[in-house]
């Protein structure tokens, strides 16, 4: 088969897989962002209990392979009567994984801000959490955008692992198509090209976001 | 009756085994400016930080207009105490105007219009009306410090604390900050200032406090401290500063 035929033949299925891939990525990145912020604030500003809980969770997730986590969710939980569909297991797995990583990116960003900002906020009578909300987070979240871009791209590619537990994402579709027409090289090359083009679009969108939110002198981005 | 604005009683602070403050007591009355001088590492900055509980003291009391400042009421009491830092600590993501009005909006819950009006007033007092829309990185050090002073003043504090406000500035920028501080002192603000600017001290201080090794060594009116210090250590320290900065800065 010619490459054009392969494209014509595979594209509908690949694109339907892509929607699942994108859905998983956006979902996990958003949920991960929310819980990442919670975990990070718990670890940096929380009391002893919150610090211990957040750190423990982050270390647990970062310290174990994502595939093992997915297997526990999908194959392990049914032992206790909790049956998840492949998609739901993948969504949960990617979300908690991303939360742990995003928490750490944000922590680094907060630590780069320095203690003076917090002191100044307290000195005008803000309470600690008010200072975090009004002064620390607006700066930290801006600084974390480059790392967040990375996380988004990682996530997009990591979602391909979900094919192993049978989620109908792009990689699963590619494998299905290829195993039918035996055009492994061309189909996977095409799949790679789709991933690559999505990554390009994402990089562009995020660098645009970074520029829009840029504040003079706050982040060194002048090239 | 002359009102005591700030009263510090037997304040002590240790960091591990190092005793930073070994029992400091002092008073600042309404409208007074007191200047704390002394070698670096003697606890001057820690003393200021203990006043508004940015650092928790180990022992002693701090009273603002008779009311004790505790870790519990610190955020309320801090609103009445303006604090100016050595390295400005302007909020980097906010314009000069927003730096000055954020406390009014978020802490004092004023309306945006009211807060803006007060903030612009304060900015014009420090001569920076035209810089209101600029971000900290677009300002010089002296301008940043003046915005920081405006930010503190906007809260209408009873007391202003200055922690070496000119130490991080280039020499040619020190004057503009000092002149704002001199105006402020003359306008009747109650001020406690840690500084090495003896010229400023001589001009506006009601009292000079010489601190060393966590203790007050000597205190008295500037005329006395500068011309006839009672303690040898004070004499030595002043001589050293004179050698460093030259006679004219001190006079």
Image (spheres, grey):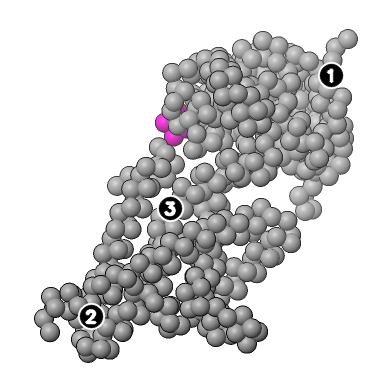
Residue B74 place in picture, x, y as percent: 77, 36
Res B225 quadrant in image: top right
What element does badge 3 sit on? Answer: helix
Establish whether labels 1 and 3 are both on one chain: no
In the rendered structure, the residue with mark 3 lies on which chain? A
In the rendered structure, the residue with mark 1 lies on which chain? B
In the rendered structure, the residue with mark 2 lies on which chain? A
According to the picture, the residue beneath numbered tag 1 turns out to be B4
For the C terminus of chain B, the image quarter is top right
Residue B21 place in picture, x, y as percent: 79, 40
What are the residue bounds of the magenta stretch?
A: B136-142
Judge left or right: residue B239 versus residue A74.
Answer: right
Q: Which mark is residue A145?
A: 3
* Residue B242 seen in this snapshot: no
> Is residue A31 shown above or below B70?
below
Return the residue found at the far left: A2
């Amino acid at each position: 088969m010619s490459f054009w035929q392969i494209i014509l033949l595979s594209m509908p299925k690949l694109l339907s897989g892509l929607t699942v891939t994108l859905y998983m990525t956006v979902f996990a990145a958003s949920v991960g962002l929310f819980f990442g912020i919670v975990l990070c604030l718990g670890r940096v500003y929380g009391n002893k209990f919150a610090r211990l809980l957040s750190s423990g969770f982050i270390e647990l997730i970062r310290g174990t392979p994502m595939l093992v986590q997915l297997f526990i969710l999908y194959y392990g939980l049914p032992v206790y009567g909790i049956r998840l569909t492949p998609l739901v297991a993948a969504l949960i797995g990617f979300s908690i994984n991303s939360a742990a990583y995003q928490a750490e990116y944000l922590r680094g960003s907060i630590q780069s801000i320095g203690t003076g900002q917090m002191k100044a906020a307290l000195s005008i009578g803000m309470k600690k959490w008010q200072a975090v909300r009004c002064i620390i987070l607006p700066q930290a979240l801006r600084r974390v955008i480059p790392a967040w871009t990375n996380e988004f791209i990682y996530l997009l590619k990591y979602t391909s692992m979900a094919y192993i537990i049978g989620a109908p994402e792009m990689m699963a579709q590619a494998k299905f198509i290829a195993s039918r027409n035996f055009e492994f090289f061309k189909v996977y090359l095409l799949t790679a090209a789709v991933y690559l083009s999505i990554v390009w679009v994402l990089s562009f969108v995020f660098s645009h976001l970074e520029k829009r939110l840029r504040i003079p002198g706050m982040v060194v981005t002048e090239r | 009756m002359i009102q005591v604005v700030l009263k510090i009683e037997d304040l002590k602070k240790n960091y591990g085994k190092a005793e930073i403050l070994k029992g400091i007591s002092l008073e600042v009355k309404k409208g007074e400016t007191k200047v704390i001088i002394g070698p670096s590492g003697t606890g001057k900055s820690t003393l200021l930080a203990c006043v508004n509980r940015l650092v928790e003291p180990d022992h002693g009391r701090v009273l603002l207009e008779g009311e004790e400042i505790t870790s519990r009421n610190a955020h309320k009491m801090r609103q009445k105490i303006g604090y100016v830092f050595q390295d400005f600590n302007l909020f980097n993501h906010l314009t000069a105007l927003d730096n000055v009005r954020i406390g009014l909006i978020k802490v004092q819950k004023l309306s945006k219009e009211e807060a803006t009006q007060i903030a612009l007033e304060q900015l014009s007092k420090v001569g920076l009306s035209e810089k209101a829309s600029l971000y900290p990185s677009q300002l010089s050090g002296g301008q940043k410090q003046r915005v920081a002073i405006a930010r503190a003043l906007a809260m209408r504090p009873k007391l202003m604390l200055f922690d070496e406000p000119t130490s991080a500035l280039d020499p040619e920028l020190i004057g503009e900050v000092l002149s704002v501080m001199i105006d402020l002192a003359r306008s009747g603000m109650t001020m406690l200032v840690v500084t090495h600017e003896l010229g400023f001290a001589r001009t506006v201080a009601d009292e000079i406090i010489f601190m060393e090794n966590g203790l007050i060594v000597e205190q008295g009116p500037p005329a006395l401290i500068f011309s006839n210090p009672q303690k040898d250590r004070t004499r030595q320290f002043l001589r050293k500063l004179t050698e460093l900065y030259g006679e004219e800065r001190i006079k």
